[in-house]
Image (cartoon, helix red, strand yellow):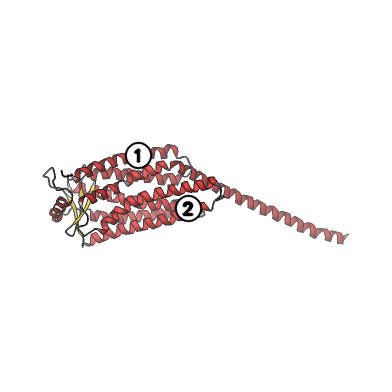
Amino acid sequence: MTIDIAEVHHVVETTINVLSIIFNCFLLYLIKYYSNFGLKLYRYLLTVDAALDLLLGIFTLLVQPVGLNGDGYSVIHSNGFIAGYSPFSDSVFMTLYFFTVHTNIIWIAVQFFYRFRLMCKNSMHERLVNFMIVTVTTGYSIIALAEIMDFCQVLDKYQSVGQYVTDMNYWPNPKDGSRRLYFVTYVKEWRMFRCLLLWTVTCCATIAIVILCEKKIVAHFRQQGNPTHSTTQRMHTEFHRALLAMAICPLITTTFPVFYYMITNGFSLCPGPVSAVMSALLSSVTLFNPVTTILCFRCYRRIAARVISCGRYDAQERDNKGTCVTQQIQVAGTVIASSTVGPLSNTGT
């Protein structure tokens, strides 16, 4: 009895994507009605993250791509509900899928940089930093979109190669005899090198930003309050676990399949079952993100309340210090005046 890899992959992808759509809709509901912790920009970041996961779940449900390598060619086969209708629709939805995946990876780094700025760098100019974040993210996303549009083109001269590689590695016995459309690229082409370079830079930069910001945030929180207090230690532990859950799950489910495809590109080291597993792992980020966020939602609110209270306490402490310094100056001035005026008056008398 042979297992139909394409059919199993289709069922698994459909289940993951339907669950991700449900959980992301529920997360958007929680953010709208239960995230009253006063940080508007942070609510905006969580909303955009949930919206990106929702869009990625919808596009993955429609496209369901799987990457295959063989005979020096890189083949992307679409196994979704809208696969094979026309070259234009396949190119558009495949471009939207890859662009959403790329934006999702970038948004992980944006979230952690904002958490670092919010909790460790309160003195930074908010408008300037927000402008820099928006400008860098938008510019890099436009470059990525141009490269992805150039990569996701249906080339007729490679269709026979794509059908051969897919039949050998992924779909040995197709149920219908219709001719499928494949996104095939020769591994030595310049556009393939540019696309791999773009994904490599994105993944490596995201991993570096997340690790650096996570270490800085945890070190900053360990310095707050009494480290020997049980409540403070418990809050630090809970916050550290929340950060690790929000960092490890998206990074593993997005960067690991991308690195795997880049390493095995050009070699016959990407069989059908492994490709299906990598594709499902890449799609599971749309399910892990809302689940970890929902589970850590109470921790979000607690941490945000603490950040706001710490900010108010610091401001109050600065005001108190300023008042104390003013009082000390006034007292010192009074002492100097009394010590100076007294002898003069005595001398005058």
Q: Amino acid at mark 2?
A: Val
Q: Amino acid at mark 1?
A: Phe
Q: Is 246 on the left-hand or right-hand side of 85?
A: right
Residue placed at 69% from the left, 52% from the top?
Answer: 327
Residue receiving disc 2: 218
| Residue 103 at least partly seen | no
Residue placed at 44% from the left, 51% from the top?
Answer: 114
Judged from this view, the residue extending furthest toward the front is 1
Tell me how many marks there are: 2
Q: Position of residue 76 (x, y in %)?
A: 21, 52
Q: Position of residue 175 (x, y in %)?
A: 13, 42
- Quarter of the image with the N terminus in it: top left
Q: Is 99 on the left-hand or right-hand side of 222?
A: left
Dots 1 and 2: beta carbons under 8 Å? Answer: no
Q: Quadrant of residue 19?
A: top left
Sort mark 1 into few (<14), some (14-19) or many (20+) by Cα contacts within 10 Å: many
Sequence-wise, which precedes: disc 1 or disc 2? 1
Residue at disc 2, secondary structure = helix
| Front residue of this view, candidates 29 and 303 | 303
Relative to 313, is 199 above or below?
below
Relative to 178, is 329 above or below?
below
Residue receiving disc 1: 23
Residue placed at 19% from the left, 48% from the top?
Answer: 88
- C-alpha distance separating marks 1 and 2: 28 Å
Q: Position of residue 264 (x, y in %)?
A: 24, 58
